[in-house]
Amino acid sequence: MNQYIEKAKILIEALPYIKEFYGKTVVIKYGGSAMIDEKIKETVMQDIILMKLVGINPVIVHGGGPEINKTLEKMNKKSEFINGLRVTDKETMEIVEMVLAGKVNKSIVSHIQNQGINAVGISGKDGATLQVEKKMVNGIDVGFVGEVVNVNTKLIKTLIATDFIPVVAPIGIDKNGNSYNINADYAAVAVAGALKAQKLVFLTDVEGVLKDVSDSSSIISRLSINEVDKYIKNGIISGGMLPKVECCVQGVKEGVETVHILDGRVEHCLLLEIFTQKGVGTMIEK
């Protein structure tokens, strides 16, 4: 009997959070190990479906770098990166679009549909959702890599209103109709900001922001954007975490209530962060 009482207590703990976030939009940037490990992938989909069933409006923006790399390798095409951005010539762009908007996007949709929940996969080209300009990296032309300049939320809002989970591939379109590859983190920030989402969640391969990178127990559970500046200056936030945290800060500045960095390798990390007092990652707020 005690085990059932404990389960009931867990549900009661979640109740105020369910009430608080009912009808609100949560944007989830889905990537990293959570897309590769089948067991974790399953728990992430379960979390998203439960969020939907308790009245939250999840919107998924996904990456797919490893799948792109595998496909390029099969085609004997070398991957090249500058400052973390994939150099994308015309042929590579066609492959990127095929993998992201086709294989990866529809796989996520299928996972959700298999659980009896409606989902629709779109790319940023559909409904001119993600409008971009060419992105230069320190004056270097990296090809068809786009920077989001406007988000047309009409299609996403229509899908939410008709009870679908939107699944967005980070492919954008410029004013001349050309396709562009968009860094999925920045695409998620742009979507979350335009929707004025309650939360933006990054599923990553790290525990969160750590005071000591060699000590996983030194996680910083809450950060204000002013504290972020301090931690960057003293070197606590550096290396690969720096662009991730900068994305989080940008999200808050664009109107997202809170932005979260979660370890996507932890089972049910979304539920633990959103529906429990303790949470499992780092939350960045104004």
Image (tube, rainbow, N blue to C red):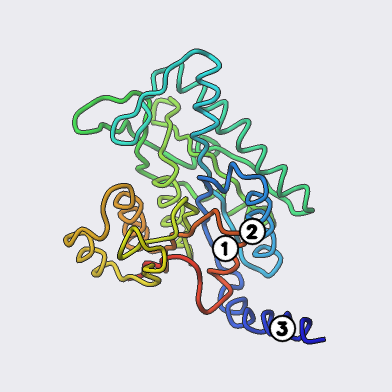
Find disc 3 in the rendering and name its residue. Answer: 6
Instruction: Please tell me whether mark 3 sits on a helix, a strand or a loop.
Output: helix
For residue 19, what is the image quadrant?
bottom right
Residue 158 horizontal/vertical position (percent): 61, 52
Q: CA distance from mark 3 to mark 2?
A: 23 Å
Viewer-closest of 272 and 116: 272
Where does the image place residue 42, in percent across and percent down from the top left? 68, 51
Label 3 neighbourhood size at 10 Å, few (<14), some (14-19), many (20+)?
few
Q: Which circle marks residue 270 in the picture?
A: 1
Locate the N terminus and report the quarter of the image it occupies: bottom right
**Three-letter code for the amino acid on which mark 1 is drawn:** Leu
Looking at the rendered structure, the kind of residue marked 3 is Glu
Q: Judging from the image, what secondary structure is the residue with disc 1 in?
A: helix
Q: Position of residue 3 (x, y in %)?
A: 77, 81
The Cα–Cα distance between marks 2 and 1, rounded to whole angstroms, is 8 Å
Of tags 2 and 1, which is closer to the observer? Answer: 1
Give the quadrant of the C terminus: bottom left
Q: What residue is shown at x 41% (from left), y 52% (from top)? A: 189
Marks 3/1: CA distance?
20 Å
Quick one: label 2 or label 1, which is nearer the N terminus? 2
Labels 2 & 1 near each other (Cβ < 8 A): yes
In the image, taking residue 137 as reference, residue 124 lies left or right, namely: right
Q: How far across and down, in percent of the image, does residue 110 sit? A: 72, 42
Name which residue type carries label 2.
Answer: Ile
Sequence order check, earlier mark of 3 and 2: 3
Residue 48 marker = 2
